[in-house]
Amino acid sequence: MRALLYFLPKLRNTTLFISMLLTASALLYAQHCETKLAQLERKQAQKFAESALQQAQAAQKAKALQEKQAQAFAELETRYLMEAHHAKHRADTTQALYASGALRVFVPASSAATHHKLPNPTAYPRLDHAPAFAQLNPKIAAQLVRITEDGDAAIRQLSACQNLLEMERRP
């Protein structure tokens, strides 16, 4: 029993030492875990920030591309409308000139249909071999102008569609 009494104060010190050692180890481990957790949270926050930055840059590029396309579409539309306006004005002017008779349309005709029999063909040698032409009625000439303007308008529309598709295909 005496030996027990001798070692009891030392055991208390040892127990105290061991409990202090365990407490210190637990505190160190807790601090280590907190440090690792903080590092992990920083890495995740950094990845999130990088991802958000990439998304913002992609959105900014998409917006810039949209604005560029909208401007190109507006320019294309303006050009098409100007061409259509000029063409309509030109066609209206031409049609009015033909309808009034200020401009005349001549078409080739066979000499038999236009030349009268000359009494003395040898007296007019140039007339027999000259090319023959006939004048179209002014109303018919104006109709021809209208028909060609319709065709030209269709070609302008097709060209505008082709330009639009070409613009969409470009990056």
Image (cartoon, rainbow, N blue to C red):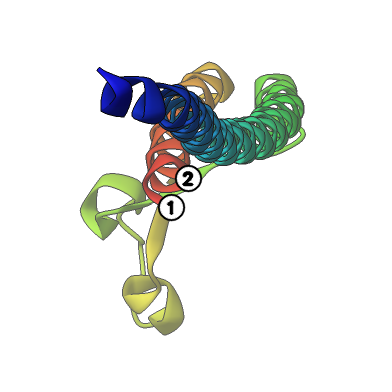
10 Å neighbourhood of mark 1: few (<14), some, or many (≥20)?
A: few
Relative horizontal placement of residue 162, taking residue 92 as reference (left or right): left
Look at label 2 and name its amino acid.
Met
Q: Position of residue 150 (x, y in %)?
A: 45, 22
Secondary structure under tag 2 reads helix
Residue lying farthest to the front in this orientation: 2
Badge count: 2
Position of the N terminus, as image quadrant, is top left
* Position of 54 relative to 99 (above/below): below
Relative horizontal placement of residue 62, taking residue 167 as reference (left or right): right
Q: Position of residue 14 (x, y in %)?
A: 42, 32
Name the residue at 35% across, 62% down: 119
* Position of 62 relative to 19 (above/below): below
What residue is pinned by disc 1? 170
**Label 1–label 2 contact, CB within 8 A:** yes
Name the residue at 48% across, 33% down: 17
Q: CA distance from mark 1 to mark 2?
A: 5 Å
Please tell me which residue lies in front, 61 or 72.
61
